[in-house]
Image: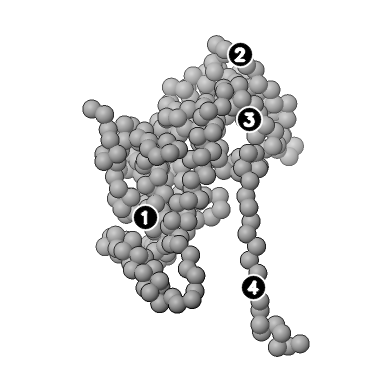
Amino acid sequence: MTSSLSDAPPFEAFMQPIVDRLKAHGRSLTNAEMLEDISEHMGLSDEVLNLRHGKWNQLVVDQRLGFARSWLKLGEAVTNSQRGVWSLTPAGAAMTASEIAAIPKQVQKAYAAQRANAVTEKLDPPQVLQEAAQEDWKDQLLSVLFQLEPSAFERLCQRLLRESGFTRVEVTGKTGDGDIDGTGVLRMNLLSFQVIFQCKRWQGSVGSSTVRDFRGAMVGRADKGLIITTGTFTSEARREATRDGAPAIDLVDGDTLCDLLKERSLGVSVRMVEEVTVDTSAFSAI
């Protein structure tokens, strides 16, 4: 049976699990960790996790998790850093289930009261709508990346690695080589590491078999392995990447890839808005 949008939980259903799983993981999680952990915690099927919709073909579960985080932030239950790490506030840790569930209505009620009391003041739209709009840039960026030719995506990853401190980055362009797309050297202080990487322009989830096959191809040829994808990694793939007794493989999913491109201004620019404030008290001392 094919899953539909109605099979995915609404954003409200993610609010309590977000708080619960933050408590279970030391009160902080990245976007990617939260998606993986909560999906497994809620028992969401692969069919539901792969549901997409909208202009930019966004993952439904990821989008609804984003809305849930935004409402929780408005309710001061969680906060986030610029690097996409979400943490539980003391107020959020103390909230009951009913208090968490009531956050959207309370925020909407407060905003309605603010509008009713405003006479000449121009009000900004609710922050949840602003944050949702801000997340759209990743959907747009991933849509562009999906349309790149495989060789162009490999060159983009090559450029990204160079911008990230790698040297001697080469794209092999070979087939039948364990899906190895390129090599590079990462120097860290006095040490340097030979790295083999793989680039997957992928809309779905990368599974554990891909990680195993890649590790088999890199053994004896490199110190570290790196897989970059526009998609996501299954929980099994992440466990396989860090399996005890096996060389660790670093994983970069689509969400992290967008952040890296933004940080290094590769096809993504950020416009800073100047805010000018007049401190009237400063003139009284003149």
Residue 259 lies in what quarter of the image?
top right
Judge depth for marks 3 and 1 and give the one in front. Answer: 3
Residue at image position (50%, 50%) is 134
Residue at image position (51%, 36%) is 142
Few, some or many residues within 10 Å of mark 2 (<14, 14–19, 20+):
few
Q: Circle 3 — which element?
A: helix
Q: Earlier in the sequence, mark 4 or mark 1?
A: 1
Q: Earlier in the sequence, mark 3 or mark 1?
A: 1
Q: Earlier in the sequence, mark 4 or mark 2?
A: 2
- Give percent across and percent down for residue 108: 35, 65
Q: Looking at the picture, which amino acid does disc 1 mark?
A: Val
Q: Looking at the picture, which amino acid does disc 2 mark?
A: Lys
Q: Which residue is mark 3?
A: 156
Confirm or deny contact between disc 4 and disc 1 (CB under 8 A): no
Q: As drawn, is 40 to the left or to the right of 190?
A: left
- Give percent across and percent down for residue 128: 43, 57
Mark-to-mark CA distance, 2 and 1: 46 Å
Q: Earlier in the sequence, mark 2 or mark 3?
A: 3
Q: Which residue is mark 1?
A: 19
- Give percent across and percent down for residue 127: 45, 60
Q: Which residue is mark 4?
A: 277
Compared to residue 2, the image places residue 68 above or below, namely below
Q: Looking at the picture, which amino acid does disc 3 mark?
A: Leu
Q: Quadrant of the C terminus?
A: bottom right
Q: Looking at the picture, which amino acid does disc 4 mark?
A: Thr
Compared to residue 258, the image places residue 283 above or below, namely below
